[in-house]
Amino acid sequence: MQFSMKKTLIFLFILSFQFFMSQTQDKKLQEKYHQFDFWLGNWDVYKFGTDSIAGKSRIESIIDGIGILENYITKGKYEGKSLNKYNPTKERWEQYWIDNSGLTLFLTGGIKNGKMILDDALSANPKEGINQIVWEFLKTGSVRQTWNFSQDGGKTWKVLFDGEYKKSK
């Protein structure tokens, strides 16, 4: 009888430990899913440091908070959308961008020094160049987005777009 009691206690201990570990892992995973939440909202997008509006963007949380959908549009007829999600299997953020100019990007990366940094180095043709986009939450409550392009494997970068997302009124 005592032997089976020991087995039962050991089983309960292992079960409790596994439950505790899964709760801890779930909490860490939930934190990862929400690293990009600083970008959520309705935004007027300006060329950084100017009053010149470049477009409007609606960034929304989707699928129970594990995905982010971006809807970007300009006064002209340009528009694009991105789908963003933390991939726990690959331990990275992924963005799939499409727009009505025909551009498609698949960016990967994550948070570095408080900034979300994604690039297409894994999916791009290095001969054509690498795109890198950096999002940074500013003390003003706005978000700076800098889109860089490199034709030498990331040694030097050219800024294609430097924007500031300010909350729409």
Image: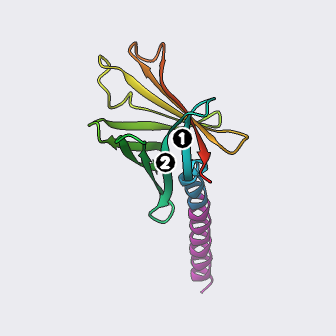
In front here: 145 or 62?
A: 145
Q: In which quarter of the image is residue 164?
A: top right
**6 lies above or below 151:** below
- Which residue sits at x=48%, y=13%? 156
Q: Label 2 crowding class (10 Å Cα cut-off): few <14, some 14-19, many 20+? A: many
Image point (59%, 87%), residue name? 1
Amino acid type at image mark 1: Val
- Figure label count: 2
* Mark 2 → mark 1, Cα distance in angstroms: 7 Å
Sequence-first disc among 2 and 1: 1
Question: Disc 2 marks which residue?
Answer: 57
- Left/right placement of residue 142 relative to residue 122 reads right
Q: Which of 160 and 34 is in front in this view?
A: 160
Does the residue at mark 2 contact the one at mark 1 (Cβ under 8 Å)?
Answer: yes
- In the drawing, does residue 115 fall left or right of residue 96? right
Residue 90 seen in this snapshot? no
Farthest residue, direction bottom: 1
Amino acid carrying mark 2 in the image: Ser
Mark 1 neighbour density, 10 Å: few (under 14) some (14–19) many (20 or more):
many
Q: What element carries label 1?
A: strand
Residue highlighted by disc 1: 45
Using residue 63 as the reference point, say whether residue 14 is left or right of it.
right
Q: Which of 28 and 43 is in front in this view?
A: 43
Q: Main secondary structure of the magenta part?
A: helix
> Which element is circle 2 on?
strand
Q: In the image, which residues are magenta?
A: 1-24
Q: Name the spot of residue 152 as percent of width and height, x first.
A: 40, 12
* Placement of the C terminus among the 4 image quadrants: bottom right
Would residue 148 be counted in the magenta stretch?
no
Q: Is residue 95 visible?
A: yes
Residue 75 location in percent, x, y? 42, 42
